[in-house]
Image (cartoon, rainbow, N blue to C red):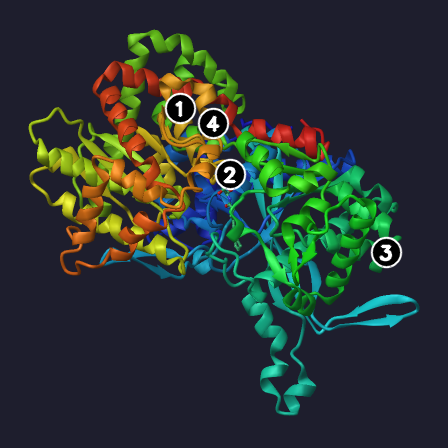
Amino acid sequence: MQVTDQSLTPNLLKSDILRHLTFTLGKDADTASIYDWRMSLSYAMRDRIMEPWFASTRRTWAEDRKRVYYLSMEFLIGRLLEDATVNLGLHEMAAKTLADLGQDFRAIIGNEPDAALGNGGLGRLAACFMESMATLGCPAYGYGIRYEHGLFVQRFEGGQQVEAPEDWLGQTNPWEFTRPEAAYTIPFKGHIEHSGGKDVWVPGESVIASAFDTPVIGWQGKWANTLRLWGAKPTGMFDLARFNRGDYAAAAESETLARTLSRVLYPDDTTYAGKELRLKQEFFLTSAALQDILRRYLARHSDLKALHKHVAIQMNDTHPAIAGPELIRLLHDEHGMEFTEALETARACLGYTNHTLLPEALERWATFTFGNVLPRHMQIVERIDHWHKDEHHSRPHYIGIVKHHEVRMGELAFVMAHKVNGVSALHSDLVKTNLFPELNKLHPGRIINQTNGVTPRRWLKMCNPPLAGLITDTIGDGWEADLDRLKELEPHVKKAGFLKAFDAAKRKNKVALSNWIGTECGVKVNPDALFDVQIKRIHEYKRQLLNILETIARWDAIRQNPGGDWVPRVKIFGGKSAPGYAVAKEIIHLINDVAEVINNDPETGDLLKVVYPANYNVSMAERLVPATDLSEQISTAGKEASGTGNMKFMINGAPTIGTLDGANVEILQEVGAENFFLFGLTAEEAMKRRQDPDHSRHAIEASPVLPDVLQMIAEGRFSPGQTDRYHDLVHRVWHHDYFLVAADFDAYLAAQAATDAAYADRKRWVKMAALNTARSGFFSSDRTIRGYMKDIWSVESAL
Ligand code: 26V
């Protein structure tokens, strides 16, 4: 197998780039734009991926290896060019070659659009998993949708979020290969006919799913897998007969459906909306993937009963949970397998990962919608439900897949999977005890844990060259694919020289970020201030509100005592709200309003700044994470399934201020309590606290600070042009504080005071930061994928 390409010399790379510039882009070096250079470099890198890609595919076929199929409605992959140069071991050579050609490498990297085919954590996890599977030599395909428009672009107008369409495919995408030969018909609607003792689905409409392949190259180019994204196309010529009858709109139905199906990513990851188009997208992805999987299997095998020995299918949340009924339909209706056997075969192939406990995000489809869009699947779901009830006579009457005229996708996924997993230790426990307690009793051992991870190639090697360089200088190379080796940094954490170098690496990143903030936000920040960062989707449970309330309290305290021994701080926020999530949008408005007042206050000056760069995305995270001093992970305990941003910060040497929620629990365990700023109610205490109907009023009245902070907001101190702007928001904190902002406020303030004290002691802080990096090895997604391979997929590495 290919390791880093040794045959490529700087001269060869240069001629590759120039050849692509001439023959692929049709441009002369004198007139080439930054786009042309970026495309030429991308093609030159892509050329180097082909050999390992083909070799991996050939090996998998030749050795008849079991393959993993990762089904996900989201792949938040971000930019691919720099990642490719890093994994091919060509980063330095590429940078130098472009410099020789008189080009700015960083600017070329920055010219690539950020592929935002996802909302947040779930989609980014899928992207990290793809990279880790390639690194580990796990034969795998990712299956998703080739959305023409990714997650919307966020702007602020008067401090409020405004959404604009994203257009990543507006320019040619150099990483994808069109595969017109891989195309499947995806049927919808219609009715069921009974003929020959069988139920036969007569679809009312259909589209074609057509494949676009992107190679995913692992570390050192030893293995490459495929991310196969489906685009929708009309089934053929439009209906000429209907057109001739003057029925123009109906004649173009397939065309309209095809246009809309893969047009845009659903931007709401907070509430399940029950929209028919979303259900159609889910079936479109799932059916195309399963048809492709069976075609590939049947090319070499004939016994469909042995499918599970060769095929492992992972459902990323319930979004592709129609995979259960669809695989049964394909096996039973199309290939004649007996129903129960089809069900058991499907279940042996399928795994289900749960990513949220929030009831409003759990998918449930009205049987009316479900039966209308997928009439045959409605029958199959009912049959699965009856079969399950018959198998388990002790199943309580209130448990079922179809209940109250709804199809519950969580229950469906659970029943149709041989393994169900949560994404952190705490979350998996809650999946057992709170989400599926009865199903867990009926199927002991089915629910397991696989704590999330992130790829250290992108989230350390690539995004943080100063720290990555220091690590290599200190413990040698090899840590990139064996992150536990970061432990070897521990003995060095005692040495002044190492700590000085660690501090210098962080400071370099902070200076770079300060400059960027200056241009991007027009705010001058002091790189020696404590950079306190909260970046993630805006959601009430993530409690950006708690953070901004503390910011106001801090501002007020500095003004009360301007001569105090304050630690200068920069509060950095980033994140988008779902377009229809009014409360989240209010919080965004408040943060921007508070920033406006604080940043223009000469009394507090450099002691406190608040910045909120618009349009947070993967590339912005790559800039912010390495420059962060303090990682904000302050969700209401029991609500954040895992978090993965928390891990990125830890790896990059930022201690956490956080609650006992999601993977924070495991971060705390790994790093030790003395290197983590813990505060707040536990999940259990939070549930108890809510039983007091007046919990927020009690908490506010008991707090020496919170009443004043809320009063300032309510009076319009931050919205002088509209003093009642935040009346509703303040009222909610007083009376409907489900996420316990008030209850945790004083504890958060105290924890923040502890961060000031720790930061003021330079040596102590740098040591803490370094220990965070040294003890972060567990959070590599390589570790996570090894767990899935062993416990869920039963698949071996090909390396
Ligand atoms: C939910 C929904 C609801 C219905 C319609 C569209 C839609 C799209 C996405 C989602 C995803 C919500 C679940 C999610 O993103 N969970 C996050 O998963 C991360 C990876 O496991 C984890 O780290 C985060 O804690 C968790 O919030």
Q: Earlier in the sequence, mark 4 or mark 1?
A: 1
The dot on residue 665 is 4
Q: Amino acid at mark 1?
A: Ala
Task: Check contact, mark 3 vs mark 1: CB within 8 A.
Answer: no
Residue reaching furthest to the right: 196
| Neighbourhood count class around disc 2 (C-alpha, 10 Å): few under 14, some 14–19, many 20 upward | many
Q: Nearer the viewer, residue 116 or 689?
A: 689
- Percent from the top left, x then y, of residue 793? 70, 35
Discs 4/3, front: 4
Q: Earlier in the sequence, mark 2 or mark 1?
A: 1
* Figure check: 224 above or below 325: above
SS class, disc 1: helix
On screen, residue 77 versus residue 711, left or right, reads right
The residue carrying mark 2 is 641
Q: Is residue 73 visible?
A: yes
Q: Is residue 617 visible?
A: no
Mark 2 and ligand 1: say if the CB distance to the nearest ligand atom is below 8 Å: yes
Q: Earlier in the sequence, mark 2 or mark 3?
A: 3
The residue carrying mark 1 is 468
Q: Earlier in the sequence, mark 4 or mark 2?
A: 2
Discs 2/1, front: 2
Discs 3/1, front: 3
The residue carrying mark 3 is 335
Label 4 and label 1: CA atoms lie apart by 26 Å
Q: Amino acid at mark 4?
A: Val
Label 2 and label 3: CA atoms lie apart by 39 Å
